[in-house]
Amino acid sequence: MLKLEDIWMQVESENGENREILRGINLEFNTGKLYGITGPNGGGKTSLAKVIMGIYKHTKGRIFLNGEDISHLSITERAQRGIGYGFQQPPRFKGLTIGDMLAIAAPDADPKRRRLQLRAVGLCPEDYLDRDLGPGLSGGEMKRIEMAQLLLRDCKVSIFDEPEAGVDLWTIQKLIALIEGGYKHNPDKVAIIISHNENILPICDEIIVLEDGMVTDRGTANQVWHLIRDDIECKVRTRCQGDLEYEIDQY
Ligand SMILES: Nc1ncnc2c1ncn2[C@@H]1O[C@H](COP(=O)(O)OP(=O)(O)OP(=O)(O)O)[C@@H](O)[C@H]1O
Ligand SMILES: [Mg+2]
């Protein structure tokens, strides 16, 4: 369904130099499967999601959705074709209520379904529909609203960027059940879950490890999980350890 062919992306750093954030990503995502993307902080997971959504422009490579090259389509056009992204840090919109936001996200959804979806992520519609999407909402509440929006939209490709971040342990189980229920074995849909969570990654059919802008491992949870834990911990420690020891010496 979704195919990424040799995707590269670069950003201009503060000193004016170009830095490659994504380096030759080749991936294919097929319907009926849950995919997990994990890897160290700064590895490029969110950037890859934003490239798929069209928020970031890739510098090289092509993106296909059901055989159509969507590389040059705008965010809106990609959304119209059924791609949805739930932000790692959902934006706040002061002056807009949660009800307004759900109506904008899924204008065709029955209002009863909007209420139901909100309840499903653990937020009582009676308390939340009229609340402002401004700074008064907690981080966990914002994540749950973002999740409700994405689930309501019934996208062909849904990308959840750390759906568990800031969400309490009781709600994480609820969110996992919602993702599994909506996407696992669904012949029309693909879910891509960016996560570091030990409860979420095992529900995925395939886990992809992204590190330094490259895919460094992939496989089932059983194949990859121990490898990920030991390998990443090891690399992160090695990369930072020398600098840390130097800083401590200087201190
Ligand atoms: N717009 C941007 N401008 C400059 N650098 C960026 C930009 N977006 C991302 N980066 C850099 O690209 C790298 C990858 O960032 P990204 O957010 O994709 O990582 P991540 O894997 O999602 O990390 P995390 O697990 O912390 O969410 C980081 O070093 C980040 O600082
Ligand atoms: Mg991220």
Image: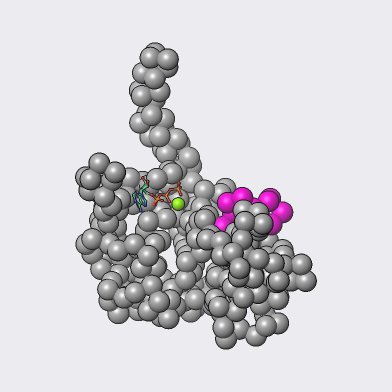
Task: Examine the structure image and report whether residue 98 is included in the region drawn in magenta.
Answer: no
**Is 68 situated above or below 125?**
below
Q: Quadrant of the C terminus?
A: top left
**Front-most of 94 and 75?**
94
Report if residue 172 is visible in the image.
Answer: no
In-image side of 149 versus 217 (left or right) = right
How far across and how far down the image is residue 114, in percent?
A: 66, 77
Report if residue 93 is visible in the image.
Answer: yes
- Residue 104 location, quadrant: bottom right
Q: Residue at x 65, y 54 (%)?
A: 138
Task: Examine the structure image and report whether residue 168 is included in the region drawn in magenta.
Answer: yes
Q: Residue at x 23, y 45 (%)?
A: 16
**Front-most of 97 and 243?**
97
Q: Quadrant of the N terminus?
A: bottom left
Count of labels in the image? 0
Furthest-right residue in this view: 126
Q: Residue at x 35, y 31 (%)?
A: 239
How far across and how far down the image is residue 190, in percent?
A: 47, 71
What segment carries the magenta color? 163-173
How far across and how far down the image is residue 88, in percent?
A: 50, 56
- Residue 77 location, quadrant: bottom left
**Front-most of 169 and 201?**
169
Q: Residue at x 41, y 71 (%)?
A: 30
In-image side of 39 versus 165 (left or right) = left
In-image side of 146 versus 64 (left or right) = right
